[in-house]
Amino acid sequence: MSGKWKAADGRRWWPVFAAFALVFLAAGCNEELVVRVATRIFPDGSVARHIELAGRDEKGQTPSAPDWLESEAGVSLADPSVWRRVERAPGRISAEGIFASVPDLPACLRHAEQNDLRPAVDHCAAHLAVDDLVILKRYRYEERWTEPLGQDAAARALDRLFELAAELVREELRRQFGEGFDTRPAETFVRGEARLLTEETIAVSRRLNRSTDAARVEAWAAVLARHGLAVSPGEKFWSAQTPEILGWCRRKIAEALSSPERTISPEDLSFWPQADDIEETIRAAARRTWGDEEKIELETEQLVFTTQGWYSSSSSRYRFESRVTLPGRLLSTSGTPEGRLEATAEGTTAVRFFRGEDLVAGDVLLQAASVTINEEALRSLGARRELDARHLLQIVDLLTERDSAGLLVALLRRAVEKSRLDLLRKDQTLPKDLAPLARELADLLDPAVEPPFG
């Protein structure tokens, strides 16, 4: 079941100070979930969307329970009430709806409560821009998928983890050396280099989440080496590093606390855990510092979960397919064109495939741009009617990228109104730097001009 995450090696409770536990956490591969989202943009800006969520259990079998996705996989539609039609079957939910505009599109998925964290909703923000280019209309669509818990929440959780770590170290030092003991150098190390090491390790884990184990181990080892830690061999990389990490922290704190008047050796820090008694030692320190061991354990688990991100912590494997169909002919996309490239009555489609772990590494974007042709405007100009991809790309470039002030578009509009293609060549009001571009536009539209200029 994916309702909980678990730590590798069976460790459910890791010390607050050893926030390095983030890299030990691992989820078993259980349920397999596929999310398919299809969005169609109509010429008037309204939107049709279809979403399908399908799952198989850890044995690859279609589940029999009608509510298996919600009760076992812990995932459902974010808000079923906003969809025109919703269908359910064991291991499958589909929904479709028509929405007035792209900003009205609802969130897709809702993930059930885990580790007493409130349910999380997938962030899938979409944006549509429509540009009237007189003879063309350009549609620019962007869909941004973001990790449900968000990078800001992860950063805040990491801050809180190390605040707890600093508090634990401060209280243990005062118990050992007295209330007046200056613990600030140790706290500075905790909030500084210890946090930095953890942050760098997490960054490597996210960046290389799709790489081989060997590549990740090599990158992790480089991070440790930069901070002066010796890397120990072992089948389970982070388990093998535990003694060295604990010893490094102990040495660094002793060095930070030492002064010309008083030298503190690592062995003087009697409260510090060893690799073989870390569980018991930290539990005892937590009881002394906060009293309520279970409460701080729960908070720490929530913080670690948030810092890792939902898809790193979940034991389910997610695959996503997102499609968008735009009016007219597809000009460009960050995804892959699907089906026929030329314009059809339904438009043209781009698709993007990604996995849950890709969202851990960063946002996933589906971008697509298309154009429709204003046949009436072309007839008014006496312009060529058959515009291929080469023509469309150059015309859009001229009227957008090279014409930020809209002067070429305004001239083109006057030319259409007066049914004079030659106005693009003869107009004397354009700035000198735009006059060659206006002639280039005229050549592209003039059926008498042959390639490569027309």
Image: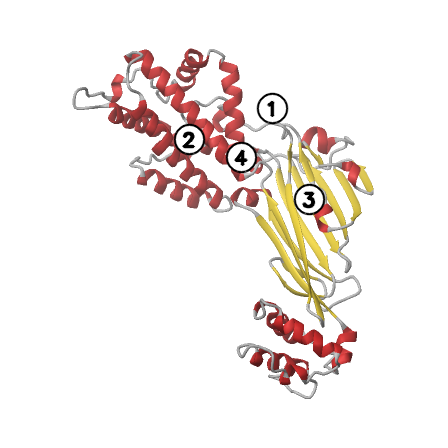
Calculate the distance from the C-alpha at mark 2 to the C-alpha at mark 1. 22 Å
Q: Which residue is mark 3?
A: 35
Front residue (pair 106, 409): 409
Question: Disc 2 or 3, which lies upstream in sequence?
Answer: 2
Residue type at numbered disc 1? Asp
Q: Position of residue 138 (x, y in %)?
A: 68, 64
Please, what secondary structure does the residue beneath circle 4 have?
helix
For the residue pair 296 and 356, the one nearer the viewer reads as 296
Label 2 crowd (10 A; few <14 / some 14-19 / many >=20) = many
Q: Which residue position holds label 2?
A: 20
Label 1, label 4: how many angstroms apart (C-alpha)? 16 Å
Residue 376 relative to residue 185: left or right: right
Q: Residue furthest left?
A: 260
Q: Amino acid at mark 4?
A: Ala
- Residue 449's place in the image compared with 377, above or below, is below
Q: Which of the numbered marks, if any, corresponds to residue 116?
A: 1
Secondary element at image label 3: strand
Chain-order first, disc 2 or disc 1 = 2
Say which quadrant the C terminus sits in: bottom right
